[in-house]
Structures are given as C-alpha cells and as structure tokens.
Amino acid sequence: MWRFIFLSIIFILITGCGQKIPEPESFTAEASELGKKDSDIQVQHFVEGNRVKVECFVPEVSFNKADRNSAKINVYIDGEFHDEYDTAAFVIKNLEAGSHKMKIEVVGLNEQTLQLSKSFEVTIF
C-alpha cells in the first residue's frame, strides 16, 4: 500500500513539473521623488544623552568661507536663537531634559536668507 502511494506522489511530481517550468516575472522600476527640489535641505539628527548630533546636506551650498556660495547654519531651540555653525555637521550639547523643537536655518554669511530650513523635535531623557 505504501509503495503505491509513494509511486503515485512521484508520478504526480514528475508529470506536474516536467512540461513547462514557469519563468520568473521581472519588471523595471524607476525611482523618482516627485515634488522635491534639488535645493532642499536634508537633516539627520541623533540624540545621545543630553546631546544632539546634527548632520545637514545642503546641495549647492558650501560651508567654506572662501567659496562664492558659502553659508552658515543658525540653530533655534524652542523658538530662541541658540548658536551658529559653519560646518554641515555639529553637536548641540547640554540640553535640558524634556521635549525641544529645533529649527535649522541655512543663511548666507551676511545673514541673507536662503529660504532653506528644517524643523524637528527631540526628547531628552
């Protein structure tokens, strides 16, 4: 009896897959970001204790004072000016415990606005 069942299963497997093996489906997709301008600022932040590490990517802007398109970053915490930085990555230290709204604003060296800013919230424990 077992021999008959075993042979039946083998027969089904051989005849079911023997004729045409299906080919894998494939397609081509293109990535796009609709509505995003090339001049947008991208900001990543990392909270470590009472410090916030901030990394900014600002296309077409340099933080080298000798360049024609040089700029700096003004940081506002809870609506008040905190500090200015002339690098794309920086650390904000000694924040008090609680939730804080931070605003990163890229401005020219003579404080003219470049209309590039991002806001985010951090929670310090």
Image (cartoon, rainbow, N blue to C red):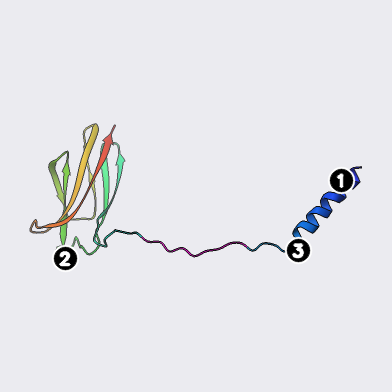
Q: Which residues are magenta?
A: 24-32
- Residue at figure coordinates x 21%, y 39% from the top left: 101
Q: Quadrant of residue 39?
A: bottom left
Q: Magenta stretch containing residue 14, yes or no?
A: no
Question: Is there a contact, CB below 8 Å, between mark 2 and mark 3?
Answer: no
Q: Nearer the viewer, mark 2 or mark 3?
A: 3
Q: Secondary structure at mark 1?
A: helix
Q: Magenta stretch containing residue 31, yes or no?
A: yes
Q: Secondary structure at mark 2?
A: loop
- Residue at figure coordinates x 75%, y 63% from the top left: 19
- Residue topped by disc 2: 69
* Image vertical order of residue 3 relative to residue 115, above or below: above
Question: Is there a contact, CB below 8 Å, between mark 1 and mark 3?
Answer: no
Q: Between marks 1 and 3, how big is the CA–CA gap?
A: 22 Å
Q: Position of residue 120 (x, y in %)?
A: 25, 43
Look at label 1 and name its amino acid: Ile
In the rendered structure, which disc, 1 or 3, sits on the residue that comes first in sequence?
1
Q: Position of residue 119 (x, y in %)?
A: 22, 46
State the quadrant of the C terminus.
top left
- Residue at figure coordinates x 72%, y 64% from the top left: 20
Look at label 3 and name its amino acid: Gln
Relative to 14, 30 lies left or right: left
Q: Between marks 2 and 1, how big is the CA–CA gap?
A: 79 Å
- Residue at figure coordinates x 70%, y 62% from the top left: 21
Look at label 2 and name its amino acid: Asn
Residues packed near mark 3 inside 10 Å, few (<14), some (14 to 19) or many (20 plus):
few
Q: Secondary structure at mark 3?
A: loop
In the rendered structure, which disc, 2 or 3, sits on the residue that comes first in sequence?
3
Q: Position of residue 115 (x, y in %)?
A: 16, 56
* Mark number, residue 19: 3
* Mark number, residue 5: 1
Relative to 124, 13 lies left or right: right
